[in-house]
Image: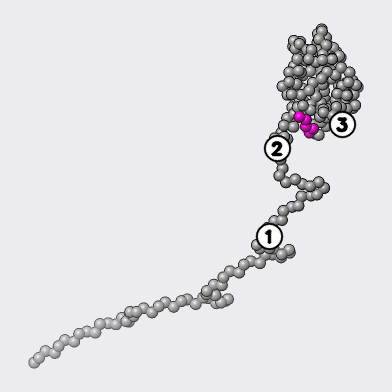
Amino acid sequence: MEIIDKKFVSLNNLMTRLRKKKSPPEGLLLLFPHCIQNSKCKQNIKHDINECIRCGKCKVKDLLELSEEYGISIAVASGGRIALKRVMAKEVQGVVAIACEKELRTGLMAAMPKAIYAVPNQRPYGYCVDTDVYMDDVIKAIKFFVKSYEKDSDKPAVKEKVEAGKKPVAKKKTAAKGKVVAGKRPVAKKKPAAKEKVVAGKRPVAKKKPAVKEKVVAKKRPAAKRKPKSLP
């Protein structure tokens, strides 16, 4: 039966994390059993937790300091009905409950659907006598509620609100300059006609070179000079 209780507590914590329930510090309750108090202590913290003198012989001192640090409520679970009444109060938005797995399972089933993060206690001397708890587990549970709330409260408000029951209208995109007809390829733009078109199958006619101003005369042999006739 103890194995079933442990599985139930683990499943509850998993569901609480998936729900991502948030709570402000003033709406979070830290609930612990009276058996955490030292059995030799004469202070009656069941009726008034402030009677604790914080001697440090048990974890009540640490739990009180933790509640003051985070600004959360704290209470002793002196009885099942009283604890359930405190948990189900409207002002309580989240609960960090410390107890043995058996008591946690019973309380979780009775307090559904309240968001409760269960922290099993340690029992070095057996059930209900000088029990203990790992403070790291308690701090982790408190931060789960408080830190999630702080993250959401820091987010800026959304300017555009969506009306209930209506889907937001998507903004129309600006029409593109060149629209493509469905099923057809876009027509390529015509290139400007070339000044000189080449006739298909014919070589382009070469441009005539401008006439040379000075024509070269065909080479001729220079005429031999005639000798003057000698006088008699």
Look at 70% across and 37% down and name the residue there.
155
Left or right, 195 with respect to 181, comes to left
Q: Is residue 117 visible?
A: no
Q: Which residue is mark 1?
A: 175
Q: Secondary structure at mark 2?
A: loop
Amino acid type of the residue tagged 2 in the rendering = Lys
Displayed quadrant of residue 210:
bottom left
Q: Which residues are magenta?
A: 20-24
Q: Which comes before the other along the chain, label 1 or label 3?
A: 3
Q: Secondary structure at mark 3?
A: loop
Q: Where residue 7 sits in the image (x, y, percent)? A: 86, 26
Q: Residue furthest bottom?
A: 232
Q: Of 35 and 23, which appears nearest the observer? A: 23
Q: Mark 1 and mark 3: span between their CA atoms? A: 52 Å
Relative to 75, residue 202 above or below: below
Q: Which residue is mark 3?
A: 113
Q: Is residue 172 magenta?
A: no
Please identify the dominant SS of the magenta region. loop
Q: Of 22 and 161, which appears nearest the observer? A: 161
Q: Which residue is mark 2?
A: 155
Look at 82% across and 47% down and name the residue there.
165
Q: Mark 3 and mark 2: span between their CA atoms? A: 27 Å
Look at 78% across and 23% down and name the residue there.
73
Count of marks placed on residues: 3
* Residues packed near mark 2 inside 10 Å, few (<14), some (14 to 19) or many (20 plus): few
Left or right, 211 with respect to 155, comes to left
Look at 76% across and 50% down and name the residue there.
168
Q: Secondary structure at mark 1?
A: loop
Image quadrant occupied by the C terminus = bottom left
